[in-house]
Amino acid sequence: MNSQLIHFAYLASAVLLILGMRGLASAKTAPRGNLIASVGMLIAIVATLLIRQVVDFTVVFAGIVVGSGIGVVLARRIEMTAMPQMVALLNGFGGGASALVATAEYLTYVRTETTPEGVVPYAIVAGLLIGNVTFTGSIVAFAKLQELMRSAAVTYPGQNFVNGLIALSVLVLGGMVVAGVSGLTPYWVLAAVSLVLGVLLVIPIGGADMPVVISLLNSYSGLAACATGFVLGNSGLVISGSLVGASGLILTKIMCDAMNRSISNVLFGAFGAASEQAGGGEGGGEQRTAKGYTPEDAAVIFANARSVIVVPGYGMAVAQAQHAVRELGDLLRADGISVKYAIHPVAGRMPGHMNVLLAEADVPYESLIEMDEINPEFPETDVALIIGANDVVNPQARTEKGSPIYGMPILDADRAQNVFVIKRSMNPGFAGIQNPLFFNDNTMMIFGDAKKVVLSIIEAVKAFH
Amino acid sequence: MLDDPAVALTIFTLSIFVGFEVISKVPPLLHTPLMSGSNAISGITIVGAILAAGHEDRTISTVLGFIAIVFATINVVGGFLVTHRMLEMFQTKKRP
């Protein structure tokens, strides 16, 4: 097919991808948007197959068949609670693919004894570097989320020094590749160093900061694709890659703002590691004790309540409690009680994590309310039911200047008339600090697994009728 | 196809702006599907992988291209399907 037509096909594909993403502006139009975007992708793939230099279709189709098989199984089988891992894994595959493409192109230049010109050598280095960092970084993020490794921040002395050294060597090696000195060696060393860099960048980041990391890796996977677009001089890749790059960056910023922390603090601050170590001997400072209650106590309170706001957190995901939570909500609604869900932007392990879980359990999305919108409603609410959330409802963020979470916007659950907290134990949350909310006079703790506790509350409410 | 780097850079810059405009309209409700969907789009690197693997002479680049196609296809197919699965859940259903 002539190259002008292929160019138009890429343009059409890019337009469809943009329109598809625009569809995500509302839940109603989103499924159609996703469909439009996938058609855009299909057009790009077909157009590429028609480019004259593509002649060996066996390898291409074999790859597509194998990849589709794995993709379909992953997408069908994955539990909604495991969505953060899934996205981390997909980011990694995208980054890895881009690094491989950059390498394949580089080797072709070397084999044909031609020199890449203009931006191409820089783009090759960028594609390799960003792609490899995304690949191993995502694998570490996956391992942390899947709890194949400790999800807490891993730190060692001289960490930032080591990272600085690696950053410096990346610059030198990249320069050598661009300049074309010393043959292939600098390229392979750069490949290895960037793989190590991906691991080192993600290990010092703790579990609850994963929303930021996943957003950032998402952005990287787009930028890596973009770099290969510059290598190949392919406009389709450049446009789509930069769309994803922009998308990931926006989400990264939203997540950082929701924690009142800078991106560098999240990436290099090893948050939670230091205070966790210090937290061992703590607890002696405050002699107040939290009051334990039973599901039956909750049923009595609910019987007199008119409004309830549920505050879900990562604990709900871990206990797979979303269906039980929805059932309780239905039961209370049947009694004429207003039930809403307050969603903190960083609740869970990835942007929007709680929304997806509750939607899976058939909670209508109109009752999932964002933080700024729901906060004024807490004082007039009879019961705030906190399920497996901790730092996002910690009032220290408002008052304690010395607290690591000071200034973080929180859900004002403590201002509700009654507060129930369902929690495994009194262990502090991710930030490694105690939560004064648990000791308030209007706070009632119910200890146990979120799902079991919610199910017993349901039983108790039914028995109370 | 894009021999002039200035043109490529122009396209890149403008696309970033388009990306910011489009994405900032996505509500927090849909942030997870946004991530998996944009994930699928980053699988566009499959275009590069096909070009690398489809060369007429089979070399080490063919092997790398093949692995890249597998990776990118997982990204594209897995990403779009799982996004679809999630978005279906956000549709208002008739409940008993």
Image (spheres, rainbow, N blue to C red):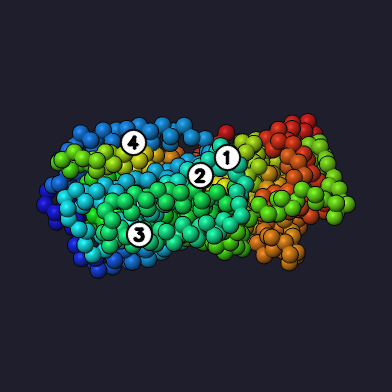
- Specify the amino acid type for callout 4: Gly
Q: Are marks 2 and 1 in contact (CB under 8 Å)?
A: yes
Tag 3 and tag 1 share a subunit: yes
Name which quarter of the figure residue A376 lies in: bottom right
Between residue A365 and residue A451, name the one nearer to us. Answer: A451
Marks 2 and 1 sit apart, C-alpha to C-alpha, by 8 Å
Label for residue A259?
none
Q: Position of residue A215 (x, y in %)?
A: 49, 53
Q: Are marks 4 and 1 on the same chain?
A: yes
Q: Callout 3: few (<14), some (14-19), or many (20+) C-alpha neighbours within 10 Å?
A: many
| Secondary-structure class at tag 4 | helix
Callout 4–callout 3 Cβ contact below 8 Å: no
The mark that comes first in sequence, 4 or 1, is 4
For label 1, the residue is A149
Disc 2 to disc 3, C-alpha distance: 24 Å
Alpha carbon separation for disc pair 3 and 1: 32 Å
Closer to the eye: label 2 or 4: 2
Q: Are marks 2 and 4 on the same chain?
A: yes
Of A90 and A202, nearer the camera is A202
Question: Considering the numbered disc 3 on the image, is that residue within a helix, a strand or a loop?
Answer: helix
Q: Nearer the viewer, mark 3 or mark 1?
A: 3
